[in-house]
Amino acid sequence: MKTAVTPLDADHVLYRELRLFNLYRILEAALLVLAVFGPVAGMLELPRHELQARAVVIAYLFVSLVVFGLGRRLDVRVSAGIGIAADLFFGVLAMHALPAAGTGIALMLMFNVGAASLLLPPRFAFTFAGIAVLLLIGEFAWSTADEGTGRSLAEPVMFAIGYFALATLMNVLGRQMRESYEIAALRTTENEHLAQVNELIIRRLRTGVLLVDGAGRMRLANEAASALVGDVGDEIHGFRELAVAVPELGRRLDAWREKAAVDDTPLRLAVDQPDVIPRFARLQANSDQVLVFLDDTSLVSQRAESITLATLGRFSASLAHEIRNPLAAMSYAVQLLEESDDIRPADRRLLEIIHQHIVRMNGIVENVLGLARREPAKPVVVDLVEFSRHFVDDYLVSHPIEGDMLTSASALSTLPALFDPRQLHQAVTVLVSNALNYGRMPGEPARVTLRVGVDGGQPVLDVLDRGPGIPEPLRGRLFKPFFTTSSHGTGLGLYIARELCRANQATLDYVPTPGVGGCFRIRLSALG
């Protein structure tokens, strides 16, 4: 984002020049006062008008002090304009009152005209230069008419040319100064903005970043590094030493500095914190300050796992396509054998075993293909209460559960939420099938309930069972692909169900229940 620099902002750089200009005006007025009242007065010719000379120089000194005192209280243009107007007014009066010092006063005014042109816009600069020329000519005419002096007209003409030339030159320089300041101010703003962006990026990095000086003190740390090593300190109370805060990390840094030895062994810096792999780099080529990067090994593992899963998914999908055709032929052949009257009863048991394993393999193939070709979600408004009722009816028709029980329950009459109905049906089918298969106590029928409710202002759909629950050590691996505790499972069901929920901006988690049973909760997105 670029911040516009206005001309008024650019004028602030000229306040130093304005201060010097005001000091020079005081010096001019003081010299004129000395010329009238000091020991120098006896060395000059008598003033043409002594009273006028004294009044003019005193008034000029007073006005100069007032303009200097106002300083930054006035705008650059206003202060410069008032100053040059006072210079010309009192300068011309002093030239007329002190004819012996007239040429010197005209030379001093030349600097005033040039300084004012540096600080003022072109139209004002040339206006004051023209006024100065007119005043010089007017004073020349006034002096000639007053005493009939034999002064040459060439003198005011030469001064007039000098005034305009100096005004032009200084005005060009002033414009270039303003433009240079505008460019510098714009670059400074951009650099500050980039510095803020870089600081924000570094602060929010999940990789810890530490700055350690030559004495081993931690000077800076981003949020991730502060969570690992704690507060690094400050300028007032002092900075903490890395060797004291994390001795092992300090030892590795010393080894890297002395021998350039790199140890890639994961390191745990604090309790309940993930392992990290430290990396070191000098801030500059010959600097003793070192940047310490703390790479979270869990992030590296997640990236490696994602790459592995993507590769495995493509391979599995290709393999599933190759298996599907011969599997269908085997299933068709078994069905024909079962219809034959020549099969002995003992052999029919073998055919049942073959058929069961064909069905299981077909389920594995369907899961793998579903994972590989999952379509994008198309969320729509779904009434969870009505969905749960229809789901139970449809499931009981297509999946006879014999003595088991599947019911729906809700204290609400309606509960809208956003989800792709087809994908929600697929995810709930996985959860219900798992609950019916594993959520039962030994020797007892399964009792599964679909419960619709609200938790924390969000609609939730719970799948509850009355089984033994899931042991604590296994809960962290429930949704890992290919993780299963059953010899007949694929380990893909819960993983696919969670991925379907994520595609619909929903979450799927295991919620421990007090007493007997388990609960898988789908937390959906609410409307509006």
Image: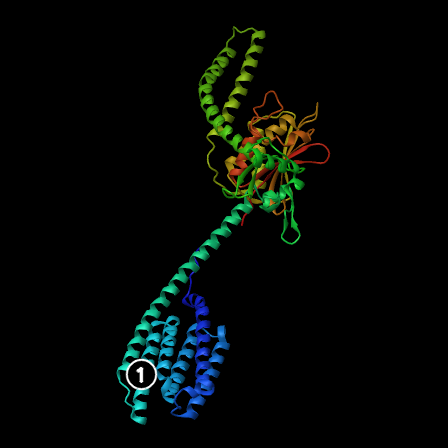
User: Which residue is located at x 45 percent, y 72 percent?
Assistant: 20
Question: In what element is the residue under mark 1?
Answer: helix
Q: Residue at x 44, y 72 (%)?
A: 76
**Residue most toward the right?**
515
Q: In the rendering, at what x and y percent does residue 37 appear?
A: 47, 87
Depth check: give the residue in front, 349 or 480.
480
Q: Amino acid at mark 1?
A: Leu
Q: Tell how many labels.
A: 1
- Percent from the top left, x then y, of residue 319? 46, 21
Residue 34 to residue 192: above or below: below
Looking at the picture, does residue 417 appear above or below residue 103? above
Residue 270, image x, y percentages:
66, 38
Residue holding disc 1: 134
Left or right: where 463 falls relative to 109: right
Q: Nearer the viewer, residue 194 or 444?
A: 194
On the question of residue 278 being in view, the answer is no
Quadrant placement of the N terminus: bottom left
Q: Nearer the viewer, residue 148 or 508?
A: 148
The image quadrant that residue 487 belongs to is top right
Vertical arrangement, residue 238 with respect to residue 61, above or below: above
Q: Residue at x 45, y 78 (%)?
A: 27
Residue at (56% x, 10% y) in the render: 350
